[in-house]
Image: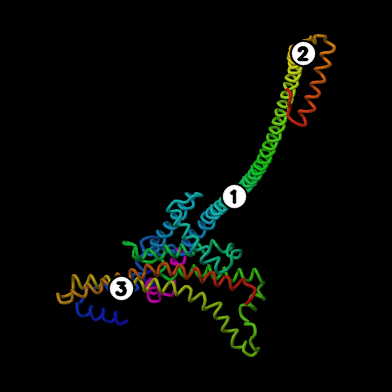
Amino acid sequence: MGTLNAANTMINAAEGGFHAPSMSEFFPAPFLFEGTPFEMNRVMLIRLIATVAVVLVLAVWAKRMKLVPGRFQSSMELAMEFVTVGIAEDTMGKERAKKFMPLIVAIFFGILFWNVTKLIPFLNMPGTGVIGLPLVITLAVYVTYHWAGIAQKGLGRYLKDALILPGVPPAMHILLIPIEFITKFVTQPFTLAIRLFANMMVGHLLLVLCFSATSFFLFDASNGFQFFSILTFAGGMFVFLLEMLVVVLQAYIFALLACVYINSAVSEEH
Amino acid sequence: MTPVNIVAAAENPLLPALYDIIWSAVCLLIVFLVVWKYVLPAFNRTLDERAARIQGGIEKAEKVQAEADQALAEYQKQLADGRAEAARLRAEAQEEGAQIIADMKAQAHTEADRIIASAQNQIEAERQTAMVQLRSEVGTLATDLASRIVGESLTDDQRSANVVDRFISDLESNSSAQPVKGA
């Protein structure tokens, strides 16, 4: 916040020339199908590009798969095993994970590619930085884990397992059942979506802030302030490196939590 | 209409616009379908094939190892057998050698005894011959000498033979007791 205030003060001092990051970047003007539900703007296009990229990479990998792998296949297998074994099977167990594997793998690689567009020059915008995509992925996970729990146990027992904690005095249930309900049906999915969305959005804003401030200090500010461009550029580089981590980390966390929720919905013990 | 929508969405980033939801769903669906129908089956198939290949390789290696172990055991057994055989042969040879030496010694003894015996026989025979010869010559010489001394002929054969015989027997009985005096 301090940085933002400082930046705002700068704008006032220099009177324009500084492109402050704003939410409107996430909602650019549409250029196709304007006014229809298929309205296409820059962010949607970036999502589609990332989708095509992930499909291409995975499909080419699957198509050229050989018994003895080359470099590309090996590294892809490493990534794939990180998801199938490291995330899904370690959380749910081998048997149970098999059923949900397509969803988990699609979530991980999809989010990874939709995130990473924020670091790619000329795209510079995360596909997951607008709430729709995190929400839709969350909805897929939400529907999956409730559906899987109900399919496995029946509605009554599923709700009982989900809402009633064992070994608690009966009176406490008045308090605990609403809490559990809110946790399972509201908080869990909500935080899942918001975590991804907020990380991506804020990361993007930080990058824009740092680099536009650098540009401002270097070209528009009075001579005495040009030194600050070094600082803001260094800050921008740091955020960029941090975002490289966050891009992968968020994909990992989302996929992992999806596994945890599914597992707790279908497991017999509470 | 649209600008209002965009502004509204821009003001509350947590409320998704409809197009946002639709494009998100399209993207997720595409990735999900590709992963589900194409990528994961291919991946699992490859892993299974590889596992089967490796399993086969391990089994083959185990088989080869077992065969090698068996062959080694066989060789070692053969080696041990060979050593035992060699030791047995050596013992036999030593025994046989000792036997041969003993046989040779015995044979040599026999031969030596035979040679000694035959030598003795020969000596005996020669002695007999010499004795017979001597007897006849001594008889002749003695009778000649005696007839010369006595002056009468003792050529009568019957008589002279008697005389010589008596003489010889005397000679023999004396020679066994003491050296001959008169001869």
Q: State how far apart marks 2 and 1 are (Cα).
A: 122 Å
Task: Answer whether residue A269 is magenta in the image.
Answer: no
Q: Which residue is mark 3?
A: A21
Is A10 drawn above or below residue B140 in the view shown? below
The residue where tag 2 is placed is B150
Of discs 3 and 1, which sits in the foreground?
1
Residue at x-position 81% and y-position 13%: B160
Residue at 60% from the left image edge and 69% from the top image edge: A147
Which region of the structure is painted magenta?
Answer: B6-23
Helix, strand or loop for disc 3: loop
The chain under label 1 reads B
Instruction: Please state the horizontal and vertical placement of residue B37, each as a whole percent of the image.
Output: 54, 55
Q: Position of residue B182 (x, y in %)?
A: 74, 24
Is residue B95 placed above or below A224 in the rendered structure? above
Residue A162: image quadrant is bottom right
Query: Label 2 sits on what residue type?
Result: Val
Q: Chain of mark 3?
A: A
Q: Nearer the viewer, mark 3 or mark 2?
A: 2
Residue A168 against residue A241 in the figure, above or below: below
Which residue matches tag 1? B65
How many circles with numbers are drawn on the protein? Answer: 3
Image x and y of residue A77, in percent: 48, 57
Do the numbered discs 2 and 1 sit on residues whose CB atoms are within 8 Å? no
| Residue type pointed to by label 1 | Gln
Which residue is situated farthest in the bottom direction here? A171
The quadrant holding residue A20 is bottom left
| In the displayed structure image, the side of residue A110 where residue B165 appears, left or right | right
Front residue of this view, candidates A17 and A256: A256
* Badge 1 element: helix
- Mark 1 burial class by Cα count in 10 Å: few <14, some 14-19, many 20+: few
Would you say residue B11 sits in the magenta stretch?
yes
Q: Using the numbered discs, state the Cα–Cα distance from disc 3 to disc 2 in whole angstroms.
A: 188 Å
